[in-house]
Amino acid sequence: MKRFYVFLLNGLLLTATAFLMRLVGFSFSVYISKKVGTEALGVFGLIMSVYLFFTTFATSGINLSVTRIVVEETAFCKDTNTKVALRKCFSYSLFFGVSACILLMVLAKPITRYFVHDQVPFYLFYLIGLSLPFISLSSCLNGYFTALRKNGKNAICRIFEQILKMLSTAYCLSLFLPSGVSYACLSLVLGEMISEIGSCFFAFVLYRLEIRKHTIGQENHQNYFKKIASISLPVAITSYLRSGLSSLKQLLIPTYLEKSGLSCTDAISSYGMISGMVMPVLLFPEVIISSFSNLVVPEYAYFDTKKAYSRITSITQKIFRITFLFSFAVFGVFFFYAKEVSFAVYQNFELATYLKILSPLVIFMYLDGIVDNILKGLNQQINVMKCNILDLFTSIVFICSFLPIWGLYGYLVVIYISELLNFSISLYQLKKANSFRIDIINWLLKPLMRNCIFFTCHKTIGSKCTI
């Protein structure tokens, strides 16, 4: 029972913090989109797609390694030398972080030419590459705090990072705008770089304060490098493939939108509108459940270590029931009030059509995030990666097939195929790992009927009141 209250307290703390920061971050994203426009937003999205791959290479699975190593040792109350273990993890992180930085700088020119359509100068990748070693170290520290259930420290780090990002980006925008797409992207890149570096230093200070509390006994001669590699490298290798395909997928979208007849500017603007404006709105409510979702990784790892399989099944069913209820409610809001949401957020109705079309996907996107974290806690992270890789291969094939014919609506079809395929395979993997039962009537049909009746009546009453 004490364990449940610790989990609940951590979840509520992270949810409150994450909701506040997501709200602030989302408001800032709306400000950015209005400030720089959809074209700059699209170009920056391409830059971040490349950056995401190199971030994956920089972290190389270290977060999960740290979490699992510390959780496993804590579960059996082993007297281990925490400082020794973390020192090995830092060495691993720095090696991959520095390697990723050097590789990005070497490839900056060809990436700018072939993938970003020469819309920005290549030195932007030099700047953003400097943050990669710090991101790698931050990932290591984040995994350490998560394992110790010191999630308040991770929350503080995220708050600090978000505030620093907003202040630095706003300041850079005030210096460089209005000077075109290149300077708008430079401002966003500088804000990203400064916030990542600052957040790493802040997390390291918190780590130093935390590690002093541990009693250090005799030197632990366990081969931590071997243990880190056994957990991280299988995840890292599949992550490279997944992240590389994900980046390729995002980079191909504007190219194949051009083949439908759009100009380069219009193609990038359309990509920026969907990925930089519509999707953040759809994903915003997920913050309510994402914090608890992240916390299930160490909890499931603990129960898996203890072989408490009945407990795993019980918790999984409760999580699914709650997530279904929440996601159906969010779907109803976006579907029935797309125009109102579009105007409230961006002061125009341009995005309402796309919000309504994509709104049913929130059910599967929210659940997919939950399922992925459960699988990671059950040491099924390789299966998660395989699922994502298959999804990305399929998406790339459909991007090449549909976008030249149907343009932007082809992109929407690809998003549907991608999300539904990813969720279906993830759910299948979870059913294999743990036999739990999905209650279709109580979890799916009843919430759907209730929401349809409620929102239809509410919409009808609202229309009559307006008249």
Image (tube, rainbow, N blue to C red):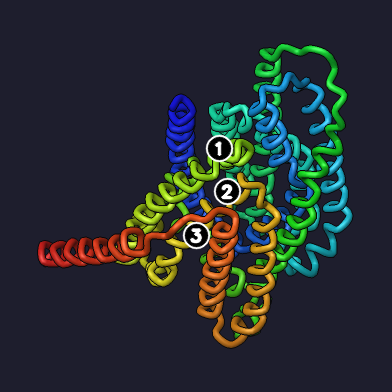
Quarter occupied by residue 50: bottom right
Between 369 and 462, which is closer to the camera in this rendering?
369
Query: Secondary structure beneath disc 1?
Result: helix
**Which residue lies at the image location 69% right of the left edge and 41% below the top edge?**
64
Mark 3 or mark 1: which is in front?
1
Point out residue 46 in the picture as x, y percentages from the top left corner: 67, 62
Between 286 and 99, which is closer to the camera in this rendering?
286
Quarter occupied by residue 182: bottom right
**Which residue lies at the image location 85% right of the left edge and 17% below the top edge?**
219
Q: Is residue 84 above or below residue 342?
A: above
Question: Is residue 227 shown to the viewer in this render?
Answer: yes
Point out residue 273 in the picture as x, y percentages from the top left corner: 52, 65
Query: Secondary structure beneath disc 2?
Result: helix
Q: Is residue 1 left or right of residue 55?
A: left
Question: Is residue 340 shown to the viewer in this render?
Answer: no
Q: Earlier in the sequence, mark 3 or mark 1?
A: 1
Q: Is residue 385 left or right of residue 325?
A: right
Q: Residues within 10 Å of mark 3 (few under 14, many from 20)?
A: some
Q: In 3D space, how far apart are the residues under numbered discs 3 and 1 (Cα atoms)? A: 22 Å
Residue 299 image label: 1
For mark 2, what is the residue?
373
